[in-house]
Image (cartoon, helix red, strand yellow):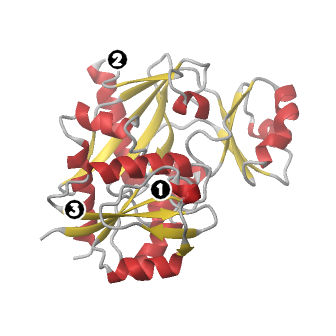
Amino acid sequence: MKKNIIVVMGGWSPEAPISMRSGKNAFKTLDREKYNVRAVILKEDRTACFLGEDETPKEEDWKDRPSENISKVFTEVLAWPVDAALLALHGCGGEDGCFQGFLSTLGIPFTHSGVTASAVAMEKDIAKLLYAAAGIRIPRGVTVSSKEDPIQKIRSAGLRYPVIAKPLASGSSFGLWLLNDEKELKDNVFSFWLNGGLYLFEEFIRGREFTCVVATREGVPVAMPVTEIVSLTGELFDFKAKYTKGSSEEITPARISEALSKEIRAAAEICHRALRCQGVSRTDFIVNDRNEIYALETNTIPGMSEASILPKAALGAGLTFSQILDDMLSEALKSAE
């Protein structure tokens, strides 16, 4: 018997347009022999819309489609009745545990991580404490609020320039800065607080950037082939490099030795377990010229658009994206048994 699945996308974070691409691709890919599929689009004003069965979502729906109160929409979702939710949300409100808690309260099983892992992974400084406790290297850093002097805190922490500055709870490389000295920090300090009340300042580690997807298959988290990320616009894999065509290369499998690949895959699995992630996660790493691996952050709902790393990593592991979605939904449905 087919399962009734909603694909949830959109939201109110700056990453909502990316979420719409992820949701649209997941919606298209789900096997209609196994699932009845409907889309739920969360809007910027925290309303929502529930599309008809097999009605393809469009990216412009996020802004243009009429919507209703979320509670009313999910009353309709429950009456359908839904069996599970496939989450394609990114950023605050969708990837940080808030929406996961809402679905848990309604009794709707969902893909990816639960409330705890989602919240912890979004708070980069807390996640890194757990990485370090599990034996994974992390860059030295300090968290600064908008009420504190970042220059003094960076000095007190003993960080040397250049430093990386990033919003504490954001993804998709929004608000990412490379600061070469205190003057650059002074010149740009106001811009930081436009991206949120807390910023993380870290030592800049020169090296090659890699990312690794971990997918739970038959209850066991297994790392997929490592992807190498090469920014063609500068030293940082920022939002522009990530989402502007021709601004970066993502090479799967990475052009590294099998020994280093094995180390990165093992580190990704350790990070996945340390945060208590479920389903699929993706952890980003920097490897310096001594082949020392540093964990940067874990995405608990990795991008799922046609251009995203997850579908490509699946192919590199000999799997289709459809199989990965099946695995995620299988894990979600088991949790409800």
Task: Please tell me whether mark 2 or mark 1 is closer to you in this view.
Answer: 1
What's the residue at 50%, 58% (across, down)?
95
Q: Position of residue 176 (x, y in %)?
A: 66, 36
**Residue sitting nearer the eye, 283 or 141:** 283
Q: Position of residue 247 (x, y in %)?
A: 54, 22
Q: Is residue 222 above or below residue 292?
A: below
Residue 53 showing in the rendered view: yes
**281 w.r.t. 115: above or below:** above
Q: Nearer the viewer, residue 190 or 87?
A: 87
Evaluate if marks 1 and 3 touch, with contact meaning CB atoms under 8 Å apart: no
Give the amino acid at mark 2. Answer: Arg
Looking at the image, which residue is at 53% across and 51% down?
60
Q: Earlier in the sequence, mark 1 or mark 3?
A: 1
- The image quadrant of residue 164 is top right
Image vertical order of residue 268 relative to residue 232, above or below: below
Q: Earlier in the sequence, mark 2 or mark 1?
A: 1
Residue at 75%, 34% (x, y): give it: 158
The percent coordinates of residue 175 (x first, y second) are 68, 40
Task: Give SS at disc 2.
Answer: loop
- Identify the residue position indicated by label 3 in the image: 330
In this figure, which residue is indicated by the disc labeled 1?
89
> Depth check: 222 or 139 in front?
222
Disc 1 to disc 3, C-alpha distance:
19 Å
Mark 2–mark 1 Cα distance, whole angstroms, equals: 31 Å
Residue type, label 3: Ser
